[in-house]
Image (spheres, rainbow, N blue to C red):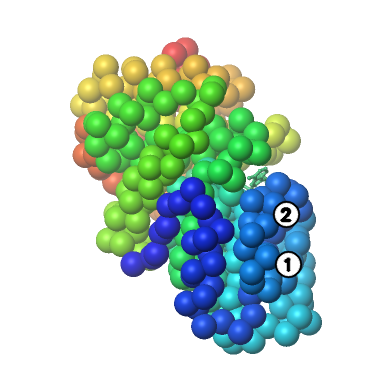
Amino acid sequence: MQNIILTNDATSELKSLIATSGSDKVFALYDENTFRHCRSLLANLYGEVSITDIIIPPTDAAKNTDTLASVWEALQKKGASRSSLMLCIGGGMVTDLGGFAAATFKRGINFINVPTTLLAMVDAAVGGKTGINFGSLKNEIGVFREASAVVCDTNFLHTLDAENTNSGFAEMLKHALLSSKEMWSRHISFDLINPDFRTLLPMVGESIEVKKNIVAQDPQEHGLRKALNLGHTFGHAMETLALKRSNTGLHGYFVAWGLVCELYLSCVLEKFPSDTMRKTVQYILSNYGKPNITCKDYEELYDLMLHDKKNSGGVISCTLLAEIGDIRIDRHPTKDDIFEAFDFLREA
Ligand SMILES: NC(=O)c1ccc[n+]([C@@H]2O[C@H](COP(=O)([O-])OP(=O)(O)OC[C@H]3O[C@@H](n4cnc5c(N)ncnc54)[C@H](O)[C@@H]3O)[C@@H](O)[C@H]2O)c1
Ligand SMILES: [Zn+2]
């Protein structure tokens, strides 16, 4: 089971992890932004441990073979061995690419994830999926390899912009919906406009627990792990459409809108309680607004859903809920159901 550490003091946690790791050399992978904003929080660590920094360009656009090769090259030139350790300090881009670089360098060196975005804390940095984009496809090349530890410190989040905070919180809301009514009610009363990062730390912890428990039951994504896809069948389609039209938007916003559609379908098809659905929808719309879609987009969105790599055999599969925590995977809404759900989102 993955070692997840929640802390207000990433420096001392990393110090003791490094001391007990038995590694000969320590490398720290940052992107340009996390190098600028997050390294200073680890100043004391650098005072005591010799660490070689590797800096890569930021964002998903750089999650590619060129950047990967540059990391392998830096490790090789700077004398990394089979028993070196890499710290991946950044958002999901850094933990995905860094984890893959570490998993493949000399057939695998140990790595520790230090997520610096909310999304990476509750999602990308845990669960063992690593990889890069390839040939215009997202996460096309990669391996399952768990970080030896994940150190989550919400102090890193003070420099993160509001959109990225909201984006990560959407995955937390998803985890709450998959878990319990008690967890859900705390999430839909969390103030996203003035987030309190101290309150957020234990919430990050319970969110990771939800993901960890689901992944532990289905590490290679054959069944139950599909629960984590809640909000994503609709969300991915809207995200891909936005991308095709070169509209920008962060993943979590599309997940939040996907949750609106899929909770609506949960009510219609699985008798999910409508008051719970309405409260969740209200929270989402007031914090995330609405996507820029019209009824003229439905056919294209439907087509994108049909061709999503998570669907096969010409049917659309999604995860629905019969109640908070009562998960129904592999549900197949009809085309009419799907159009109705988009109507609901637009008119809500
Ligand atoms: N492996 C998985 O299971 C999994 C799950 C979900 C997402 N992902 C991947 O994660 C990536 C998205 O992750 P993300 O949302 O963290 O994006 P990201 O890593 O691109 O970070 C978003 C932006 O915030 C900046 N940033 C990061 N931390 C900061 C901080 N503390 N202060 C200021 N700026 C900061 C980054 O430089 C970047 O510009 C995608 O590549 C996605 O495919 C992987
Ligand atoms: Zn997601």
Quadrant in which the N terminus appears: bottom left
Given residues 283 and 347, the one toward you in this image is 283
Q: Residues within 10 Å of mark 2 (few under 14, many from 20)?
A: some
Determine which of the numbered discs, if any, sits on residue 325 in the image: none
Residue drawn at (61%, 71%) of the image:
86
Whether tag 2 and tag 1 are in contact, CB under 8 A, the answer is yes
Determine which of the numbered discs, if any, sits on residue 35 in the image: 2
What amino acid is at disc 2?
Phe
Given residues 59 and 195, the one toward you in this image is 195
Q: Position of residue 212 (x, y in %)?
A: 35, 56
> In terms of secondary structure, where does tag 1 sit?
strand
Q: Residues within 10 Å of mark 1 (few under 14, many from 20)?
A: some
Instruction: Give the vertical position of 87 relative to 121 (above or below).
Output: below
User: Which residue matches tag 1?
Assistant: 53
Given residues 82 and 313, the one toward you in this image is 82
What amino acid is at disc 1?
Asp
Residue drawn at (27%, 17%) of the image:
275
Q: Position of residue 226 (x, y in %)?
A: 36, 51
Instruction: Give the vertical position of 81 relative to 274 (above or below).
Output: below
Instruction: Give the vertical position of 85 relative to 318 (above or below).
Output: below
Q: In which quadrant of the rendered view does residue 126 lie?
A: bottom left
Q: Is mark 2 within 8 Å of ligand 1?
A: no
282 with respect to 19 (left or right) = left
298 with respect to 275 (left or right) = right
Q: In which quadrant of the rendered view does residue 259 lie?
A: top left
Q: Is residue 292 visible?
A: yes
Q: Is residue 142 visible?
A: no
Q: Position of residue 282 (x, y in %)?
A: 41, 17
Quadrant in which the C terminus appears: top left
- Could you tell me how far apart the alpha carbons at marks 2 and 1 are, in whole angstroms? 9 Å
Instruction: Give the vertical position of 25 relative to 304 (above or below).
Output: below
